[in-house]
């Protein structure tokens, strides 16, 4: 029964997220609502860690695998992107490098300046 | 053969096998470039071409499991909660670092798309490229972008972070584990986070939190930005 109730809680929060996405008129995905609500529920003790832990760890371990199917779907759009392949790749590579650099360097500078208590 | 190809569980088994083969190849070659996700995609594509199985049959089967992406992403709340005491210490630096990275990413993607004269559809598809796909793909779709292209772009982004992240930390002199985690999570979401967790559990936890915060910030910024596109 443990796994059944764990799955039920996790899917319940997913359902709440899906519901909110449909009701709230901004472009925030269901997973964001669900994640924030589950985190708040854990913080406030409404949901205990042991009520979601094992099923949650299992579902999270599936994440990389779930990327495969949708990526294969790119073959469908090959005609559309073929002509723009170079700019798309350039944008993806350059912005990834810049995002990595800026977020890391800014965080390190702020932590160095103090404010972090070891 | 046609009837066999339409068995719904076939694409799922195929994907599981391809992913395991990809993981085995990475273990054997020890090369970060041999990313299991990337290898699995190539293996599945090769199988489709070789066997004559229709892409539609493959996708129809995968639809039965792809919705698990949302609950699996919801579960990222669990490591955030578990590492909360550790994360709390650097909250301000993390928040500012993630915000700076996410904003820079959106501005730069937008600018480059305009520079190259890409269509609105492609621009909207590329904008959420650094956030995890359960967040990024619906963001692209809500703005009128292409879901599957967005997924591919998100995965390439994740693999870039996972492959070059460690070298980038050395080059930039990022020695602080919190800064490393923020860089991995903000720039390369779940896929980069897997790599960050190999460096240390703290870097992994910071990366998890950062990918979530980056996803939240990007959702909010894009839901406003879409109005101007």
Image (cartoon, coloured by chain):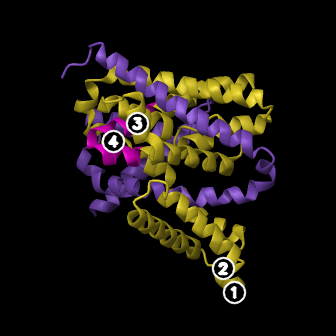
Chain colours: A purple, B yellow
Label 2 is found on which chain of the structure? B
On the image, numbered disc 1 is attached to which residue?
B1
| Range of residues picked out in magenta | B193-213
Q: Nearer the viewer, residue A90 or A115?
A: A90
Where is residue B53, by image quadrant?
Answer: bottom right
Residue positioned most to the left:
A118
Q: Are marks 3 and 4 in contact (CB under 8 Å)?
A: no
Real-space CA distance between mark 3 and mark 2, rounded to the nearest whole angstrom: 40 Å
Real-space CA distance between mark 4 and mark 2, rounded to the nearest whole angstrom: 39 Å
Residue A70 location (% of width, % of height)? 61, 56
Between disc 3 and disc 4, the foreground one is: 4
On the image, numbered disc 3 is attached to which residue?
A37
- Give a yes or no on whether discs 3 and 4 share a subunit: no
Q: Are marks 4 and 2 in contact (CB under 8 Å)?
A: no
- Classify 10 Å Cα crowding around label 2: few (below 14), some (14-19), many (20 and above): some
B32 with respect to A46 (left or right): right
């Amino acid at each position: 029964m443990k796994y059944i109730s764990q799955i039920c809680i996790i899917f319940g929060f997913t359902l709440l997220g899906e519901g909110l996405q449909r009701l709230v008129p901004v472009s925030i995905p269901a997973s964001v609502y669900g994640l924030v609500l589950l985190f708040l529920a854990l913080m406030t003790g409404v949901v205990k860690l042991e009520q979601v832990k094992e099923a949650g760890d299992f579902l999270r371990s599936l994440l990389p695998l779930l990327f495969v199917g949708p990526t294969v779907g790119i073959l469908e759009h090959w005609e559309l992107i073929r002509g723009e392949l170079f700019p798309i790749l350039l944008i993806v590579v350059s912005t990834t490098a810049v995002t990595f650099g800026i977020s890391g360097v800014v965080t390190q500078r702020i932590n160095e300046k103090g404010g972090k208590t070891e | 053969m046609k009837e066999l190809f339409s068995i719904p569980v076939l694409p799922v088994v195929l994907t599981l096998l391809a992913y395991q083969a990809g993981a085995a190849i990475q273990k054997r070659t020890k090369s970060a470039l041999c990313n299991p996700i990337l290898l699995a995609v190539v293996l599945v594509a090769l199988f489709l071409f070789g066997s004559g199985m229709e892409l539609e049959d493959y996708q129809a089967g995968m639809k039965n499991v792809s919705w698990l992406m949302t609950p699996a992403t919801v579960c990222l709340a669990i490591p955030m909660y578990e590492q909360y005491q550790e994360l709390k210490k650097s909250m301000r630096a993390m928040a500012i670092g993630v915000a700076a990275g996410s904003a820079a990413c959106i501005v730069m993607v937008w600018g480059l798309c305009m520079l190259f004269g890409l269509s609105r559809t492609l621009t909207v598809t590329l904008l959420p490229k650094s956030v995890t796909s359960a967040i990024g793909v619906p963001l692209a779709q809500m703005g009128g972008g292409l879901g599957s292209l967005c997924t591919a772009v998100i995965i390439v982004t994740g693999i870039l972070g996972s492959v070059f992240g460690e070298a980038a930390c050395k080059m930039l002199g990022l020695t602080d584990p919190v800064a490393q985690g923020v860089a991995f999570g903000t720039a390369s979401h779940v896929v980069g986070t897997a790599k960050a967790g190999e460096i240390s559990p703290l870097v992994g936890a910071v990366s998890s939190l950062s990918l979530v915060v980056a996803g939240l910030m990007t959702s909010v910024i894009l839901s406003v930005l879409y109005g101007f596109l």
